[in-house]
Image (cartoon, helix red, strand yellow):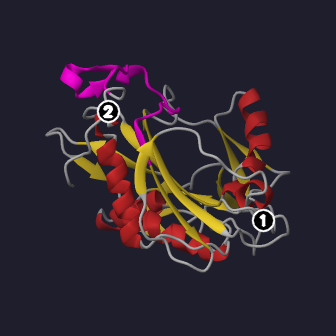
Amino acid sequence: MAPSPKSTPEANANSNNDGKYPDVNWEEMGFSLTPTDYMYVMKCSIGEKFSQGSLIPYGNIELSPCSGILNYGQGLFEGLKAYRKEDGRILLFRPEQNALRMKAGAERLCMPSPSIEQFVGAVKQTVLANERWVPPFEKGSMYLRPLLMGSGPSLGLGPAPEYTFLIYASPVGSYHKGQRSLNLVVEEKQHRASSGGTGGIKTVANYSPVLNALSRAKAQGFSEVLFLDAATGKYIDEASACNIFSVKGNSISTPPTHGTILPGITRKSIIEIAGTLGYQELP
C-alpha cells in the first residue's frame, strides 16, 4: 500500500498515542458506527463507465428525493474488513471477491459498476486515508461499507440517470459481542427470499424485510433468526445476515447458492479451508 494521505488538523484533534490512534476504547467497542475521517466517492452517468473518484471528508451526502435508491431501492452494498497485524501492517480480506459480487448484483439491477481494479483501489485508498482508525492487533477490525446506488432522479420506473459508488469505514468489534454462542429461532411464517428474486445478490432491499422477524426473535431472547426456503418451508435457507453451516464429524454442509442465498465470501473461504483440513462438503 502507498503512504496514507496527511490528516487535517481537525482529524487529529482527538488523537492519542502520539497521533497514531484516536481516543477510542478498543476493549469496549462493539459493532456500531464510529465515524472516521474520510470516505471515497465516484460517480458516473447511465451508459458510461466509472472513471476517477476521490477521497472527501466523511459526512452526509445530498440526494434527490426522486433518486432511484430512495424510490425504487436501486442499490447494492458490500461489507469487508481490514485487520492490523502484530507488526503494524494492514491486511484486507479478499476484496476482489466483493468486487466480483458487486458486479453481479449491478448487472441484475441495471447499474454500471466499478471494475475490480477500481473497487480494490478505492478500498485501499479508504483504508489508508483512515489508517489511524484501524484497531491495534487483536483489538478489532476496520469495517468497510462500499455502496453502489442510483443517485440520479427517476420519477417513472426505470434505471436512474446517474450512479454513485461510495465507501465509508468504521472501526468495529465483534458483531455478537459478549455472546459465546448464538441462540437461533426458526421463522416459519415469513421468508427471506424466493426463487427468481434477488436473494442471491446484496441489494439493499433484501434486508429491511427481515427486521420484523428479527425484532420478534430478539424480544423473545433469541439472538438470530433462521429462515427456511420459501418453496417448501422444509429446508434451511440462511440467517438474517449471514450464511449458516452444520458440522458433523469430518463433514460440513451449507445450503447451496441457487439464487436465493447470497454467495458469501466467508462462506466460500470456509469451504476452501475446510477442504484443505480434510473435511468433506456434503451436498
The amino acid type of the residue labelled 1 equals: Ser
Q: Report crowding for label 1: few under 14, some 14 to 19, many 20 or more residues within 10 A (C-alpha).
A: many
Outermost residue, left direction? 87
Task: Examine the rendered structure and indicate whether residue 169 appears above or below residue 199.
Answer: above
Residue 76: numbered disc: none
Amino acid type of the residue tagged 2 in the rendering: Thr
Mark 2 surroundings: few (<14), some (14-19) or many (≥20) residues within 10 A? few
At 68% across and 65% down in the image, what residue appears?
Answer: 199
Whether residue 23 appears in magenta in the rendering, the answer is: yes
**Where residue 39 sits in the image (x, y, percent)?**
44, 46
Q: Is residue 217 left or right of residue 58?
A: right
Residue labelled with disc 2: 8
Q: Residue 49, how many percent across, how many down?
A: 51, 76
Q: Nearer the viewer, residue 72 or 182?
A: 72
Q: Left or right: 282 with respect to 155? A: left
Q: Give whichever of discs 2 and 1 has the lower sequence position.
A: 2
> Residue drawn 37% across and 49% down?
126
Q: Is residue 48 above or below residue 201?
A: below
Residue 73 is drawn in which quadrant? bottom right
* Residue 122, quarter of the rendered image: bottom left
Q: Is residue 59 left or right of residue 124?
A: right
Residue 96 picture location, percent across and down: 38, 67
Please give the range of residues in magenta.
Answer: 12-39
Instruction: Assign the N terminus to one quadrant of the image.
Output: bottom left
Residue occupied by mark 1: 154
Element class at badge 1: loop
Q: Is residue 36 magenta?
A: yes
- Location of the C terminus (image quadrant): bottom right
Cα–Cα span, label 2 and label 1: 37 Å
**Element at label 2:** loop
Q: Is residue 102 visible?
A: yes
